[in-house]
Image (cartoon, coloured by chain):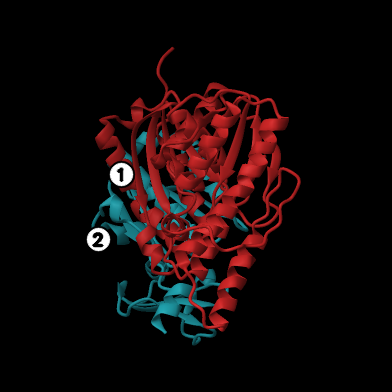
Chain colours: A red, B cyan
């Protein structure tokens, strides 16, 4: 079969990214332009500013990818773009850009869900083996899924309130850490020990809850401040992280016992967390399950994962039209 | 020569096709929202109903606002992507200039309303004599409002003749009106 080259575009939050992906598995070339430094000035992503920067930079990012790959748009077989979920204004820039390229070069347009992108990021380093258990962990998601084949998502459980990444960010704020909070909490946790007892709720299902744990951290910091006691930030970060990840260990263990899966993958921004990676690795070893985790560069938002997720849709000829719209909230499952 | 003008700064999508510097055809389409659904299909429609292939377009003119932030961005994104990939010249005109050059008067004051206020421009002989501003609330009577002006697209084209083509990478909307975080930081 002829090789398939997909030009993929991802602008759902604060990264303007374009990649060329071959046969859904090989990232030929990618550029990820992050706006992190700009948004750090405001303590978080400002949607309007993110949209502005996407518009300013997107053609330059394409220029770079075409130059580095020594390919032209004529060589491309399809244009893929993240259409949901994410920041609406940001998504719209990528979608309009993709539609323009699709029209000008007569290439099929493929609309990709961002979460599918995170899952299929694993195809860039390994091959998805079905049936598999997928743990999606990010700033907006904490989902446990079973996939029996491509694009077949069965939800086992999810967070009842905050996503795990959101909890990390809120804890970061309480500890006066700079944006991006999650990675900074992880840094402190590495230096600390699990000494604080944090109250939180274990559910006896596949669902998790993070609002209790988050409140517990906030209350502890508040009370210690009122008493004039100093907080050991490293230890608190470590205690929080241990508790947060143990929630995930609990539900994944339950799934290993009750579901017949021999393959597992982790996806989403929080899959870059090395403590989570280590814990899942030893759990999978214990249960003799193959674990797939994307390379660090494919864990955070990037266009290569969108190209990987577009490939099964390309094979099925599931193409979008030029009236494609972006959506901030369309869920995958 | 065929030129395409893209104007999405307001709730009306305006697309104009020029042949040899005169209007050949145009589409004005009112939307409630979701420009994104309509712009590309309308461009296809405009070209198809005139039997024109996209590769015959040799020049792009785009309106860079001021007006709807998202609306302007979408038009700009299409225009700069087109000009960059097809290596054709791109010219940029503001919504206020477009209104001013449609009014046959020496001195013109024009206003574009949005939900809370107005974008204002003052011109003499089609030249901007004051920086564009945004004001909240009411404005004086001597401003001509966008809704009462019929845009003369042939005049608009004449006006763009005097403009330099731009580097597509550097084309971006003008925003003028401050957003929340800008107001916070100026406090």
Point 73% across, 31% down: residue = A258
**Front residue (pair B110, A292):** A292
Point 30% across, 38% down: residue = A65
- What's the chain of the residue with tag 2? B
The residue that mark 1 highlights is B84
Residue A134, numbered circle: none
Circle 1: is it few (<14), some (14-19), or many (20+) Cα within 10 Å?
Answer: some
Q: Is residue B178 left or right of residue B32?
A: left
- Residue A158 lies, in percent from the top left, at 68, 46
In this view, the residue farthest toward the bottom is: B140
What count of labels does the image hold?
2
Point 51% across, 56% down: residue = A89
**Marks 1 & 2, CB-CB < 8 Å contact:** no
How far apart marks 1 and 2 lie (CA) works out to 21 Å
The residue that mark 2 highlights is B162
Q: Quadrant of the C terminus of chain A?
A: top right
**Front residue (pair A76, B51):** A76
* Vertical arrangement, residue A51 with respect to residue B85, above or below: below
* Vertical arrangement, residue B142 with respect to residue A322, above or below: below
């Amino acid at each position: 079969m002829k090789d398939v080259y997909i030009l993929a575009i991802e602008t759902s939050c604060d990264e303007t990214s374009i990649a060329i992906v071959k046969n859904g598995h090989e990232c030929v070339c990618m550029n990820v332009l992050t706006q992190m430094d700009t948004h750090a000035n405001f303590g978080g992503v400002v949607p309007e500013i993110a949209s502005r920067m996407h518009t300013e930079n997107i053609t330059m990012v394409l220029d770079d990818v075409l130059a580095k790959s020594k390919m032209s748009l004529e060589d491309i077989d399809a244009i893929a773009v993240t259409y949901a979920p994410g920041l609406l204004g940001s998504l719209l820039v990528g979608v309009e850009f993709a539609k323009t390229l699709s029209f000008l070069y007569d290439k099929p347009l493929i609309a990709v869900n961002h979460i599918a992108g995170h899952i299929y990021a694993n195809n860039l380093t390994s091959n998805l083996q079905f049936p598999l258990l997928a743990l999606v962990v990010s700033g907006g998601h904490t989902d446990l899924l079973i996939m029996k084949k491509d694009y077949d998502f069965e939800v086992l459980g999810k967070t009842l309130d905050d996503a795990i990444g959101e909890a990390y960010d809120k804890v970061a704020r309480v500890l006066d850490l700079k944006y991006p909070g999650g990675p900074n909490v992880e840094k402190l946790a590495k230096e600390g020990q699990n000494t604080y007892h944090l109250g939180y709720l274990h559910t006896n299902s596949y669902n998790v809850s993070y609002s209790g744990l988050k409140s517990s951290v906030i209350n502890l910091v508040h009370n210690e401040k009122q008493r004039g006691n100093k907080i050991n930030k490293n230890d608190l970060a470590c205690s929080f992280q241990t508790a947060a990840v143990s929630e995930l260990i609990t539900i994944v263990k339950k799934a290993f016992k009750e579901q017949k899966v021999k393959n597992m993958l982790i996806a989403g921004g929080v899959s870059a967390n090395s403590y989570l990676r280590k814990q899942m690795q030893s759990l999978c070893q214990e249960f003799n399950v193959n674990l797939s985790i994307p390379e660090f560069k494919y864990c955070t938002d990037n266009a290569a994962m969108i190209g990987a997720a577009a490939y099964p849709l390309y094979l099925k000829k599931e193409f979008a039209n030029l009236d494609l719209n972006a959506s901030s909230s369309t869920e995958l499952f | 020569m065929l030129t395409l003008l893209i104007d999405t700064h307001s709730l009306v999508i305006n697309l104009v096709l020029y042949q040899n510097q005169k209007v050949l055809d145009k589409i004005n389409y009112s939307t409630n929202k979701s420009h994104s659904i309509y712009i590309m299909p309308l461009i296809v429609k405009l070209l198809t109903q005139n039997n024109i292939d996209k590769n015959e377009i040799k020049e792009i003119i785009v309106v860079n606002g001021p007006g709807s932030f998202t609306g302007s961005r979408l038009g700009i994104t299409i225009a700069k992507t087109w000009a960059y990939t097809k290596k054709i010249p791109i010219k940029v005109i503001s919504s206020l200039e477009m209104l001013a050059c449609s009014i046959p008067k020496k001195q013109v004051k024009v206003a574009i309303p949005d939900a809370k206020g107005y974008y204002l421009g003052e011109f003499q002989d089609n030249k901007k004599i004051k920086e564009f501003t945004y004001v909240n609330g009411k404005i004086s009577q001597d401003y001509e409002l966008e809704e009462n002006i019929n845009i003369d697209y042939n005049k608009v084209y004449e006006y763009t003749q005097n403009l330099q083509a731009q580097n597509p990478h550097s084309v971006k909307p003008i925003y003028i009106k401050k957003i929340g975080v800008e107001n916070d930081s100026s406090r």
